[in-house]
Image (tube, helix red, strand yellow):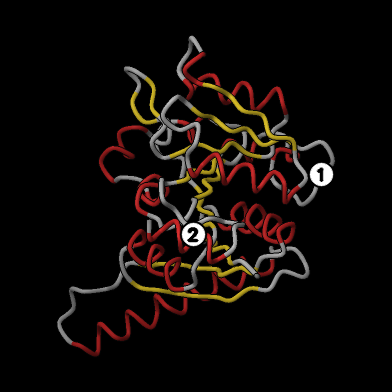
Amino acid sequence: MTHTIVLAIEQGTAELVARTGGELAKALGARVVLAHVREDPRLFHSTLERERARGHATRSGRQILDRAHDMLPSGVDADERVELGIAVNRLTEIADEVEAALIVVGTRGRGRLASALRGSVSRTLAHQAPCPVMIVPDTARAGDPRRLPDGPREGSTIILAVDRATESSDATRFARELAKCLDDRLAIVHTHSAAEPPAKVLPAIAASEDARLIVIGDGLRFPFSGSVASQLPRLAPCPVVVVPEGARAILGEAGEADARRAA
């Protein structure tokens, strides 16, 4: 079975998302859908003016996707989708339509106030997506490039963070399957044993292990600090995969995933 990875392409993060998601797709033998979502123009005096604005938005989106396509590694099969609408909603619909195994999205590096006022596409996606979401932080760009998933690398490590409530979660199954497929070492961090908040401990562990990525469940929490999924991507030195409970399995057989969704 060939899996599909959706790469959410935006102007400021296109190169990082295309490189990171493309190399992972190549390592997994997956196909790629490059998806760019722009706001749908609405307030115009005439239908003709609106259609012209929509056409301009679509053409601009295609130019961004063409550049992102050129950044993919050779041999990766990719389709392109330019959509108009609300980014989170359209990306979720695309992932459902193509039965995506994973969505890869970047972060804009906004400040705390701006993030609180506007919200974050990556964090919102991590809550409502039908499949795991890989968030590629801006900090990965400034760090050691070996920490990006640049294809198969001997001795790579995947960090899995669990607490008592998530030890048998979909995130755990996902991390084990991914590590097996990539022939990576899986390092499990029990956050309930740590004295510091996971959002502080996990980046340090990932840096010391030169980790390929960190995997957490959407429900992973820490007393007094709230959701780890909303904090970790801002601090991690490598991509973070958030796995919503009940999400579509990335590497399991289709029948197994369907059975789990129906249960």
Whether residue 75 sits left or right of residue 60 in the image: it is: right
In front here: 129 or 249?
249
At 73% from the left and 40% from the top, the residue drawn is: 145
Which of label 2 and label 1 is nearer to you? 1
**Where is residue 224 shown, x and y percent of the image?**
32, 17
Secondary structure of the residue carrying tag 2 is: loop
- What quarter of the picture does the C terminus occupy? bottom left
Whether residue 59 sits left or right of residue 144 in the image: it is: left
Q: Residue under circle 2?
A: 10
At 69% from the left and 39% from the top, the residue drawn is: 212
**Where is residue 175 shown, x and y percent of the image?**
60, 42
Residue that extends furthest to the right in the rendered view of this protein: 154
Whether residue 151 sits left or right of residue 86 in the image: it is: right
Residue 161 is drawn in which quadrant? top right
**Where is residue 178 shown, x and y percent of the image?**
65, 48
Q: Residue under circle 1?
A: 153
Above-or-below relation of 183 to 202: below
Secondary structure of the residue carrying tag 1 is: loop
At 31% from the left and 63% from the top, the residue drawn is: 86
Q: Amino acid at mark 1?
A: Arg
Q: What is the crowding at mark 2: few (fewer than 14 residues within 10 Å), some, or many (at least 20)?
A: many
CA gap, disc 2 and disc 1? 28 Å
Q: Amino acid at mark 2?
A: Glu
